[in-house]
Image: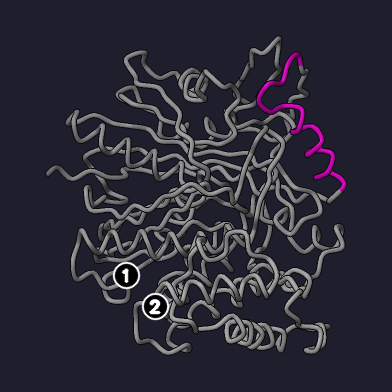
């Protein structure tokens, strides 16, 4: 079987951000919970951005004229029929001989799109696929979840020269069942049963890993992987999931489990801790964080777990080749907002979701180098590059 | 495991978590009618109670056990049922 995987990756986590501490103070939330959540801050979508502009901005450095498939994973699509991919395709100037579609399954969408793209590349040898996972959460003001609701996109180029991540096709573990732990019945409404969702995450992690072990007998969660990256709604969830997994599947004592977390898992949470949860894109962001923070001169085996509410989950095994490089986004370059500025931006963002009609947009030229939404005329969205 | 035993197991896990929580409710207020949210536990602390209790009962984390149960008494009932089925 041909080697297939990620040839290049790029992330855009917004041009502005808000520290979690400031949001906790402004909303009157209990600061003692912040350490457990592990959140530092989150990206904030600007008033001239939507999921299309975020996706295009992340994907632009990877655009090339031989891309055969462009798939966007999102739960923030701007139309019930037309895919976000069509807008991104236009913004990137890709050829018309290109397959365009969108996938959705909550936070699992990015990994689902990656697997679909890898499958398509495997049957069209030599072809390239561009996968972009992007989301703009419906922010739930005043709830603890708000501090983790980021924005942004991660783009990956999939092909047969996998210099960043080589996928192990055909042996991933899957686990899914219907569950109402998180619903998004409209573009600006999120309904979450936190306890159900957190337990489902653990249930799915154990189930997906067990399915992977059925396909690759003898796999050991401790010795079989140099690094682990998981869907990261907030780093505390990943720490708890890792602890549960190792309590179940290893003989490690609590202090050894904590050390194992620091060594193999924590690097994957650094970007999500500062960017916030980007839903469909978060597992890809965790992978990028792990690779970028743990460079090595030898091949490293990376275990990846993705969970999407509703629910669907997958555990995949891949290899990060020796010397692989992944450029981390410079999150320190983002503009730090005050809470009143953030609230004003949120008010504008709520006007730009699916179904928005005849909405003027003020383009913010002080943040260059990105795609922007210039206006909505009727239901038609117009975009430009700054 | 009986429902009474399961309730004691849950109370023990709640008290263990509350031990590290500032301004926690007094132990005598951890009663069968309490929900984990009533007790002021964060989502991660609630997860610790649920997963710890399931683990102590020899069960894996499962939404089938949690779905629809809110008070400690309700959780104890489903925990007891699950252990009998197991």
Magenta stretch prevailing secondary structure: helix
Q: Which mark is drawn over residue A248?
A: 2
Percent x, y of residue B11: 66, 85
In the rendered view, would you say B7 is above or below A210? below
- Point out the tag, 1 or 2, that comes first from the N-terminus: 1
Residue at the (36%, 16%) spot, across then down: A95
Q: Secondary structure at mark 1?
A: loop
Give the magenta-colored segment's residue range.
A340-358
Q: How many numbered dots are placed on residues in this image?
A: 2
Q: Residues within 10 Å of mark 2 (few under 14, many from 20)?
A: few
Percent x, y of residue A71: 41, 30
- In which quadrant will I find the C terminus of chain A? top right
B5 magenta-colored = no
Residue located farthest toward the left when viewing the structure as drawn: A1
Q: Residues within 10 Å of mark 1 (few under 14, many from 20)?
A: some
- In which quadrant will I find the N terminus of chain A? top left
A356 magenta-colored = yes
Looking at this view, is B45 or A6 the one in front?
Answer: B45
Looking at this view, is A322 or B35 the one in front?
Answer: B35
In the rendered view, would you say A346 is above or below B68? above
Quarter of the image where one finds residue A325: bottom left
Q: Is residue A240 left or right of residue A121?
A: right
Camera-near label (1 vs 2) is 2
Q: Is residue A12 left or right of residue A173?
A: right
Percent x, y of residue A351: 76, 27
Colour scheme in use: one colour
Percent x, y of residue A12: 55, 42
Q: Give the alpha-carbon distance from disc 1 to disc 2, as whole Å.
A: 19 Å
Q: Is residue A56 left or right of residue A183?
A: left
Q: Is residue A172 left or right of residue A53?
A: left
Residue at the (68%, 21%) spot, across then down: A355
Q: Which residue is mark 1?
A: A226
């Amino acid at each position: 079987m041909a080697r297939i995987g990620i040839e290049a990756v790029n992330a855009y986590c917004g041009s502005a951000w808000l520290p979690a501490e400031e949001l906790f103070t402004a909303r009157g939330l209990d600061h003692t919970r912040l350490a457990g959540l592990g959140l530092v801050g989150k990206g904030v979508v600007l008033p001239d951005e939507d999921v299309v502009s975020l996706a295009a901005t992340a994907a632009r450095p990877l655009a090339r004229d031989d891309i055969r498939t462009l798939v966007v994973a999102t739960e923030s699509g701007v139309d019930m029929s037309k895919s976000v991919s069509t807008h991104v395709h236009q913004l990137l100037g890709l050829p018309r001989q290109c397959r365009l579609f969108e996938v959705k399954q909550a936070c699992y969408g990015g990994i689902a799109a990656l697997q679909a793209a890898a499958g398509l590349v495997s049957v069209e040898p030599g072809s390239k696929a561009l996968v972009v996972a992007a989301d703009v959460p419906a922010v739930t003001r005043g709830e603890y979840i708000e501090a983790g609701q980021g924005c942004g996109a991660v783009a990956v180029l999939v092909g047969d020269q996998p210099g960043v991540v080589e996928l192990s096709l055909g042996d991933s573990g899957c686990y899914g069942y219907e569950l109402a732990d998180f619903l998004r019945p409209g573009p600006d409404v999120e309904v979450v049963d936190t306890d159900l969702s957190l337990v489902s995450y653990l249930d799915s992690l154990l189930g997906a890993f067990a399915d992977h072990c059925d396909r690759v007998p003898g796999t050991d969660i401790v010795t079989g992987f140099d690094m682990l990256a998981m869907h990261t709604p907030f780093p505390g969830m990943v720490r708890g999931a890792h602890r549960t997994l190792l309590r179940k599947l290893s003989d490690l004592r609590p202090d050894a489990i904590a050390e194992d977390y620091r060594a193999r898992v924590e690097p994957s949470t650094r970007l999500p801790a500062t960017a916030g949860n980007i839903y469909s894109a978060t597992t890809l962001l965790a992978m990028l964080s792990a690779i970028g923070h743990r460079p090595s001169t030898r091949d490293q085996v990376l275990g990846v777990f993705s969970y999407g509410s509703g629910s669907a989950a997958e555990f995949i095994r891949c290899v990060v080749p020796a010397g692989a490089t992944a450029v981390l986004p410079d999150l320190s370059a983002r503009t730090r907002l005050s809470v009143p500025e953030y609230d004003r931006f949120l008010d504008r963002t709520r006007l730009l979701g699916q179904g928005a009609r005849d909405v003027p947009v003020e383009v913010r030229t002080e943040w260059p180098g990105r795609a922007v939404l210039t206006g909505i005329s009727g239901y038609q969205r117009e975009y430009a590059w700054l | 495991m009986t429902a009474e035993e399961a309730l004691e197991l849950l109370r023990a896990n709640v008290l263990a978590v509350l031990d590290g929580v500032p301004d926690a409710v007094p132990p005598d207020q951890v009663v069968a009618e309490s929900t984990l949210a009533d007790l002021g536990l964060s989502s991660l602390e609630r997860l610790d109670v649920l997963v710890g209790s399931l683990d102590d009962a020899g069960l894996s984390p499962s939404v089938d056990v949690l779905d629809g149960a809110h008070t400690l008494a309700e959780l104890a009932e489903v925990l007891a049922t699950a252990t009998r089925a197991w």
